[in-house]
Image (cartoon, grey):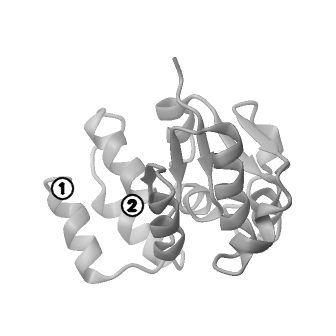
Amino acid sequence: MPKIVVSNTTPLITLLGVGQFDLLQTIYQQIIIPEAVYLEIEEGKDKNFYTDLKQYTWIQIVQVQNQRLLPHLQTLLDKGEAEVIALAEELTVDIILLDEKLARNYAKLQGFTCVGSFGVLLKAKDMGLIQSIKPLLEKAQKNGIRMSEQLIQQILKVAQE
């Protein structure tokens, strides 16, 4: 049975930017995103890797029903992150795709399993879907994705590269 997966903006942008967006469908079959995440992606229409997510049948854009929870979450997190966590609570998701540290920590405290952009790439490599992570990390950095040298080394160690 497919897992229920909700994604924040950064993992989508990162995977679009490194040309590995379809890994999400291959690994998870379907991705659910809240309206705020879709709107954040739409704000990036000037990016050369922009894609209208509505064209993908395996991405479902959903409006958060629990509007009372959002103001509380938005005192800690940005709108997209808040909607991702609120939606995760509504749908009892299996995995949240989330990169930002504060949001990940909050989600984990709520009992959610979080996977980041590079966790997706590590899983793809483990499944034999990609050969190497290092060039993808370099491309992500060129696209403006910030990561510490320590994180890069940790990812490469796990990837055995």
- Tell me the number on the disc at residue 158: 1
Q: Which residue is mark 2?
A: 136
**Left or right side of 71 for 110:** left
Query: Would you identify the image quadrant in which residue 156 lies?
Result: bottom left
Image location (x, y in percent) of residue 122? 31, 49
Q: Residue at x 23, y 79 (%)?
A: 150
Residue 82 versus residue 126 in the image, above or below? below
Cα separation, mark 1 vs mark 2, equals 15 Å
Query: Nearest the camera: 41 or 139?
Result: 41
Query: Would you identify the image quadrant in which residue 69 lies?
Result: bottom right
Discs 1/2, front: 1
Query: Nearest the camera: 19 or 89?
Result: 89
Per the image, label 1 sits on a secondary structure element best described as helix
- Circle nearer the N terminus (1, 2): 2
Per the image, label 2 sits on a secondary structure element best described as helix
Image location (x, y in percent) of residue 138? 37, 71
Mark 1, Cα crowd under 10 Å, few <14 / some 14-19 / many 20+, is: few
The answer to whether residue 130 of the structure is visible from this angle is no
Q: Residue at x 50, y 48 (%)?
A: 20
The answer to whether residue 155 of the structure is visible from this angle is yes
Q: Residue at x 73, y 75 (%)?
A: 74
Image location (x, y in percent) of residue 153? 20, 72
Residue 80 versus residue 4 in the image, above or below? below
**Left or right side of 62 for 6:** left
Query: Nearest the camera: 76 or 142?
Result: 76
Residue 101 versus residue 7 in the image, above or below? below
